[in-house]
Image: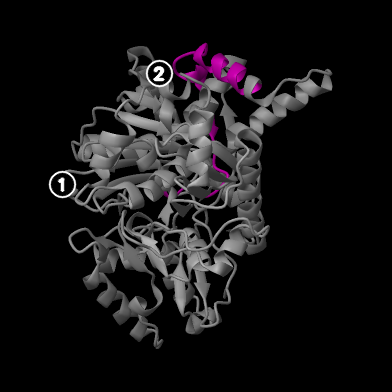
Amino acid sequence: MAQSIQETLSKGHTFLGIELGSTRIKAVLIGEDFSPLASGTYDWENRLEDGIWTYHIADLWKGIQTSFQRLYEEVSSRYGVPLTRLGALGISAMMHGYLAFDKKGTVLAPFRTWRNTTTEKAAGILREHFHFNIPQRWSIAHLYQAILDKEDHVKDIAFLTTLSGYVHWKLTGEKVLGIGDASGMFPIDSRTKTFHQGMLDQFNALVREAGLGLKLPDILPQVLSAGEKAGVLSVEGARLLDPAGNLSEGIPLCPPEGDAGTGMTATNSVAERTGNVSAGTSIFAMVVLEKALSGVYPEIDMVTTPSGKPVAMVHCNNCTSDLDAWVRLFNEVLQTFGARVEKPALYDALYAQALEGEADGGGLLSYNYYGGEPITAVDQGRPLFVRMPDSNLTLANFMRVILYSTMATLKIGMDILTEKEGIRLDRLLGHGGLFKTKGVGQRLLASALNVPVGVMESAGEGGPWGMALLAAYLVQKGAAETLEDFLRNKVFVHAGGEAAEPDAKTRQGFADFMKQYKAGIPIERAAVEYLP
């Protein structure tokens, strides 16, 4: 077995996926059988600067280079083979946001991430013009808000892209974007598998009214679907990725994708009637549709799979940040008494406590809003924990409610799909930090959404693994093999995993919690108003 892996590495029959997540940059290398061979990570954090959530470009490249170097070192130490060749590689990252460049490739404004909720006016105008939901975090909302605010840099924009599109451009020289990531920039026409021409024309008309010579098709990336060629690693790109100079240029790259698309790929949720939930710093559910929705909902984004199929996306800005903060606090308490508990063990113990709590959380209430939450019309974050004098404050109830809060806003959006639109799902597949402790997050989410929730064993590496699969699809697909067939018949043919079924008692308890949660949203809005 070791010899075959060494041979695979020496011949370059491996595939690399790199994903820039909200708290971690991770590189995952897989072999021809799609199993992970090595990985490398780098932790990073967004910054709130001048009221804008951002990441520094220098931190981005340091993180990519460090994660690749750590992967390279793991390959060398485990297999005794230097990693110099690859079959293909792919870049994925957080979707949406705003990265604008001039003709010389100079960034014109600090990177504005998906987490910002500063584009309400622009999103509302575009929603009305397009008769299509434009969320605040979409690139086009950021661009139009900059136009409305008369930001000076707008006149100099020559290229507008996402985080994955930017990295891919620097590695290959190609200004392209995978269709899934592109669908978070501007609406996609699933028939033509490119940006919607009618809406492009409408936007250009709005721009003319503002007196700008900007034409949207001239500054947006070319849209590509999974399996299409997206360029090769240039000499400069190889040195950017690997300053040590070990990696060869000329490696094919697949279209860069967003973290939603890699999540769908990693959970085999790209076919109709399938869905997945990604739960980390943010939480979002993706449901691949058989038909268009009957209405336009501000809570529902219409995006696509990496192959261009229409997807209803419920995206919530906040998930585990508040949970992580409480766990850090409990760890400080333990350290005060001289106790040392490993981080995974502490999470497991606290998650286990949540299962012992009362079904409704004992009358406790939590809002995990580190950032604004458009689904509940809260434009800034103020994490809150609220209780009545007679609420039952126990550790078990506290942890249950903290976990409930990670999925409460998702429930509000999903109810639109299941109750108003009548969409039914056989199962949702979960991935991300919320599901690391086995059987807890998925059990609570299954009851909250009233649908079985599975966590695939083979999706343990999450989005970066999904990106590596898309890189493999570029090279290994058959002549007419769709992404759905490739995943079903080759990657997941023997996949395991357990599904948690909804529990009647927990389902009712969560429903009772949600009544209080919805009633208490004005408390959160008041916190924003009175705690500037």
Label 1 SS: loop
Above or below, comparing residue 420 to residue 191 in the picture: above
Q: Name the residue: 53% across, 22% down.
A: 437
Sequence-first tag of 1 and 2: 1
**How many other residues sit within 10 Å of disc 2, few (<14), some (14-19) or many (≥20)?**
some
The residue type indicated by label 1 comes to Lys
Where is residue 14 drawn, in percent x and y?
46, 45
Q: Name the residue: 34% across, 85% down.
A: 208
Where is residue 79 drawn, in percent x and y?
60, 35
Where is residue 343 drawn, in percent x and y?
67, 26
Residue 318 appears anywhere in the view = no
Which one is nearer the viewer's eye here, 241 or 129?
Answer: 241
* Residue 437 horizontal side relative to residue 492, left or right: right
Above or below, comparing residue 223 to residue 158 in the picture: above
Q: Name the residue: 57% across, 40% down.
A: 39
Q: What numbered label is drawn on residue 509?
A: 2
Query: Disc 1 to disc 2, how far (Cα)?
Result: 33 Å
The residue type indicated by label 2 comes to Gly
Above or below, comparing residue 470 to residue 341 in the picture: below
Label 2 SS: helix
Res 263 quadrant in image: top left
Q: Name the residue: 33% across, 76% down.
A: 217
- Residue under pointer 1: 291
Residue 288 within the segment the image draws in magenta:
no
